[in-house]
Image (cartoon, helix red, strand yellow):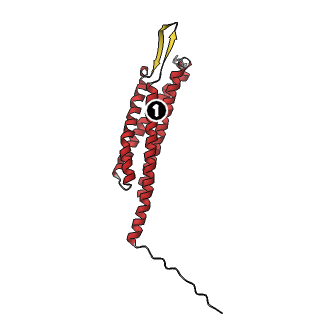
Amino acid sequence: MMKSESTAIDVPALEPKAKASFIRDERGSYKKGIAIIDFFLRLGALACAVVAAATMVTSDEDLPFFTRFNQFQASYDAVQTFQFFVIAMAMTAGYLALSLPFSVVGIVRPHAAGPRILLFILDTVSLGLNAAVAAAAADTVYLMHNGNATLNWFAICLQYTDFCSKVSGAVVASFVSAAVLMMLVIMSGLVFMRRH
């Protein structure tokens, strides 16, 4: 009877220094992937904020009354909530545009913690501003569509249909921008949790 000899394959053990660099590379590629997603989410939020502000600014409509010389006009600057909306969305868009270079630093240097912490803090502030202004504008749009019988406020969207549709679109775009900012804040939090 023949004895079968088993051949063992020698696998070299990783040295502690090599093992540490392997773990560092794995974490670095993970952070780099998150930073790339972060950059594209910022571009999306920037586009939504610009669309929201631009749509609100261009929303106006004239209604002729009896003659073409007497007209009623609906415009965003007639409502203070919408004025605040335009200013806040412009500030959010400006912040998102200025944050893009910091996001690129996160892609180039995935282990740099300073830019990530700065973006996390400013994203949280921007999210609060964006959500507040979107909620206030949504409440005003609701009153424009439905009115309030208790206070004798009439629904003006029965007459100003184009104005109301543009304003509603601007509010929807601002909520999309807020949702993307929320995703950015959550992603930053997950990166910090994985770091420790």
Residue 8 position, x and y percent, is 53, 82
Residue 121 position, x and y percent, is 37, 45
Query: Can the viewer see residue 166?
Result: yes
Instruction: Give the residue displayed 58% in from the left and 87% down from the top.
Output: 5
Q: Is residue 162 above or below residue 32?
A: above
Which residue occupies the extreme top position in the image? 67
Q: In this view, does 175 lie above or below 23?
A: above
Instruction: Give the residue displayed 55% in from the left and 83% down from the top.
Output: 7
**Element class at badge 1:** helix
Residue 19 position, x and y percent, is 41, 69
Query: Can the viewer see residue 121?
Result: no
Residue 34 position, x and y percent, is 45, 52
| Residue topped by disc 1 | 51
Viewport quadrant of the C terminus:
bottom left
Left or right for 58, reference 113: right
Viewport quadrant of the N terminus:
bottom right
Residue in front for this viewpoint, 132 or 170: 170
